[in-house]
Structures are given as C-alpha cells and as structure tokens.
Amino acid sequence: MRPRRPGGIVTSMGGYADRIAHVNLSSRKIEYEPVDPEMARKYIGGRGLGDKLVFDAGHEFDAFDPENPLVIAVGPVTGTLITMSGRVAAVTKSPLTGTITDSHSGAWWGAALKWAGLDAVVFTGKSKEPVYAAIQKGKVELRSAKSLWGQGTSKTTDLLEKKQGKDSRVLAIGPAGENRVRFACIINDRGRANGRGGTGAVMGSKKLKAIVVTANIKTMPKPADPERFKTAHAAELKKIMDSPITSPRKGGLSVYGTEVLMNIVNEQGSLPGRNAKTSHFEGADRISGETLKATILKSTPTCHACPVACKRESEVKEGKHKFLGEGPEYETTWAIGAMCGNDDLPAVAYMNGMINDLGMDTIEMGVTLAAAMEASERGLIKEKVPWGDVDAMEALIRKTAARTGLGKALAGGAWRAAQAWGDTSLAMSVKGQAIPAYDPRGIKGMGIGYATSNRGACHLRAYTPAAEILGVPKPYDRLKWEGKAELTKTFQDLFATLDSLDVCKFSSFAWGVDDYAAVLGGVTGWDVDGDEIMETGERIYNLERYYNNLCGFTGKHDTLPERFLKEPGTRGSKGSVCELDLMLSEYYQLRGWSAGIVMPGKLQQLGITA
C-alpha cells in the first residue's frame, strides 16, 4: 500500500522533479519550493499547475502589470519515455483576451526543463533591463540580455546556444514580444511556438528575453512504479503505431503533417476563406499537404519521444521567397493562405518563418490581415490591402511587429483592429482571440467549442473534428448540432488533463481515457483511473472559468462572430449556419453553470478553493 496523507493524497510522487522556482524580476530574488502533493493530485502539472499558480496570485491587475505571473510548467509525464511527452505550458493572464490563458509547444525544451530539475518557473515583477534566465541543475540565474534585445528568435537562439553550450535549449521572444504586440508568442527550437494568447508579450513586458535550459537526459526522473510504467508505455506505443492517423507506417500525420487536413476540410465546406466570407477556398489544393510534400518538403523532424514526426521542414530554393526552416503547419497555411485569399505556398512558408522570427502567433496574424483586407475592400481604411497580395502582407507583418503605420492597429489583434475601424463584425474572433482553421457552419462542434473556450476561440480546447471528420472516438454528423454540447464538454475535460500531463493531443487519436490513467499511475505511483482523469480535467476547466468570471466574463461572452450565425456556408456546408443558442443551453446544463458563471456548489463539488 502506498503511503497516503490525510484526504487520500499520495505522499510519494514519481515523475516530478519536486521543485518550483519563483523568480522576482524586479528584486532579482529567486526562491524554491517543493511541489505540494495535494496540488499535484488535483491539478497534476503543466496547464493545471500553471492555472492554480496564476489563480492564487490574484486577478485584479492588467496583463502587463508586473504582478501578473508568467508560469512556465511541465507535467509529471514530461521528459519520460512515454510517447509525445515533450511539451511545455506557458500560463498567464492574456493581454489579448483578458482571460487566463495557457499555450503549449513541443520539440525538446519541455523535456530539458524536467531533466534540469524543475517542474515550473514562476516569473513575476519586471526587470530594469533586458535579462535572460539560465537554468541548470535545479537552479535559475538571471543574466544580461542587453545585446540580445531587438534580435529575432533565430538569432537569439543561435547566440545563446553558442554561449550556454550545445546541450542548451532556448525559449525566446522576438521584437513583437519586446514591443508588446498583444499576440506575441514564445518560440523554442526556432519554430515551435507557445503561440496563442500573447504569452510572449507578457514575457516582453517583464524585460525577459529568453529562458535557456542546460540539461542531461541521464537526469530523467524515474517512474515510481517501473513495472506498471513499462506495461503502460508498451500499450500506448502499440496503439500509436497501429492507428491509421498516427502510425508512421500507415500514413496520415506522418506522411503529410498537419496539412493533411487542408483538402479534406475544404471539400466539406468547413475551411473559412477570405475572412470567412465563404466556408471554402478555391486555391486550397495549391497550399495543401500533398502539394507541400511534392514541392518544398525537405525533412520531417520530430519532438521528444515521438515516432509520428508530423513536423515539416521546408526549403524554397528559387524566387523571392527563398526559405529554409520549419513549417508551415495546417493552421498557419490556412491563416496566411486561405483566410487571406493567398494560394502561394512558397510565400506562405516564407511568411511563416518571418512571423516565427519576429515572435507572433501565426493564426492571429493571418486573421488580423484578413480583417484588414475586408476593411480595405469596404473602404473602412485608407490603405489598400488586396486579397492575396503577398507584398502587402509581408509589409504589414513587419509593421505589426514594430507597431508602425497600420501595424499599430493590427498589433492589438483582429478584434481590437476592427473595433478601431468602427465595425467589430470584421473580426472572426471570440473573447478577442481569432478563430483557427475550422468553420463552425460546417463543423457544428467547433461552434460551441469556440464560444465556450476559456482562452478565446480555439480548436485545442475541444478538438471535435476528431469525431466530426475523422470518426474518433466515434463518428458524429458534423452538420447536426445535437449531441455537440456533450461532445465538447468531454473533449474539454479530457484535454485539460492532457495539457497537464503535458502530452501532445495527437495521442488522443489512438489512446482512450484509461490509457492516460495507466500512464499517469505508472509514472507517479498513484492509484488513478479514467474517472479521476476526467474529474481532474473538469476541475481545471472550472477553475479557469471561475478566474474568468472574477475578471468579469459571463455567458454574454460565450458567442460567435455574427457571420457564422447568419450567413450560410458554402460548398459542403451550403445553406448551413451554426445553431449556437441551442447548443449553449444544453452545454450550461451539463456544466452546472448559470449563464456562463460557475456556481458555488460546483466549486465545492470539485474542491476548488480561493
């Protein structure tokens, strides 16, 4: 029998480094504390742990206030042999939405943080001058970044890797984060982004240029129950290798990357085109995964402990858009491509690299450009920004990062820009954050998913296309609203736990809830089952919603752009609109919320305390 504390909390915890660093950038004071076992059991790590640390810090401040914490956190599974376990979470109050936000990236940095002996780093305050944080052997040091300020993420990474050593991994912001562009992101490995919500802008507001981790894989934490871990790992890996979606032997993500979806979603009339004036794009095939593979694909690198290798590295050898680097992914190709009426794949790859180097969210950038194009078409702005004009797009991307000219308006994201232009209907946004590459007129689950997402429009809070397009875990009719509230809640709760473990959501194409329980139990030594996995996710989702409620968010913010509610879709969703109100009523009932507000009884039921 494993030792337990009062209340059923296991005292021994495998998988954790059992160390959280608190870094006050104003005073330069750095303190350390162990991971509280009760907090670990209730919120796990990654997103959940970050949420709790941000929640406990309070909410009555602006996102750019020095009091706003920026939490960089990993989970107990991170850095182990478990498949897809290399991710890291950045959690803070968002300058884009005003909500709590968490954003995740893959590659190797997350594993390196665990191997360096930390579960989380909490940054508060604001440095007087630019600094970077150097992490090694469980300790954090602050060092001058004056010479790095103003550099792009690639140059910053090059310089810090050279300075800190070949075993170092770098998380960095670019000029956009320094200039507090509200959708600035954090980049690691030159192309992996903690992309959404403006986490890079918060980092920039603190004068924190980068976080460098130097670690050795030999320090990988050992599982608390080696035999259970071995069994769970073997079972989950077999499922990954057998799935037609994730198996490198059978196609799907391994062959075409995330871009495998472009033609599929377009044919179904679920791909927003030209600022979602249509739900398809006639040039989709020219920017598809099939075309990328046939023309500019150079290699397929992968992340820690992942055989899927969905990442793409592209090379454009000729023309004005010569490029060598990571991407583009499906979301980026849609945002910079179809959403803007652009079918020039080399230009998309080039702009993807540019946006990553400047340190911005490619989704928000693309949707904001699309809003500017429609505003230009309607004469709401004096600047001419034609649909698909690559030269104009490139110029505006640079101006946005620098906050010059029209870029001053664009730097606030699509919703703020549209507000400045006098017509917020131009913004395909929810709670101030731009939609991703799925049209809710053609995929109804995405409608309720976008509307009720705690961090603004997002496909990764509840990826209902898994069921509505790919039939996982079972098929749902994408054009029917019935059953989508329950489907969305289930995905939201499950994904909250996945983000806390922190494992890639692509694992959910192959694993079931009991697989996640087996993995967590084997690593930590806990007695955990599928019901606890789902209850933990529900707790995390409700904690986020409660934080947002305290910040003034209610059910009136759980809505969609009017275009999706009143203007019918095209092609495979011709004549269809999103019946949000019907889904929302059912969703609130399932959640036990009243008008989008978490009730005291629900907080008590889930053990959420201030």
Image (cartoon, rainbow, N blue to C red):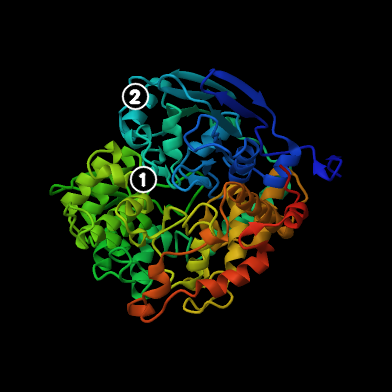
Q: CA distance from mark 1 to mark 2?
A: 25 Å
In which quarter of the view is residue 263 placed? bottom left
Which residue lies most toward the bottom here? Answer: 575
- Classify the position of the C terminus by image quarter: top right
Front-most of 45 and 489? 489
Which residue lies most toward the front here? Answer: 422
Q: Which mark is residue 544?
A: none
Q: Where's residue 309, x and y in %?
A: 43, 52
Q: How many marks?
A: 2
Q: Amino acid at mark 2?
A: Leu
Q: Is residue 573 left or right of residue 379?
A: right
Residue denoted by label 1:
412
Nearer the camera: disc 1 or disc 2: 1
Q: Secondary structure at mark 1?
A: loop
Residue 388 seen: yes
Front-most of 557 and 6? 557
Q: Residues within 10 Å of mark 1 (few under 14, many from 20)?
A: many
Name which of mark 1 and mark 2 comes first in the sequence.
2
Image height of 492 relative to 199, above or below? below
Residue 170 seen: no
Q: Residue at x 75, y 38 (%)?
A: 37
Q: Which mark is residue 148?
A: 2
Q: Where's residue 155, x and y in %?
A: 31, 30
Q: Is residue 189 left or right of residue 231?
A: left
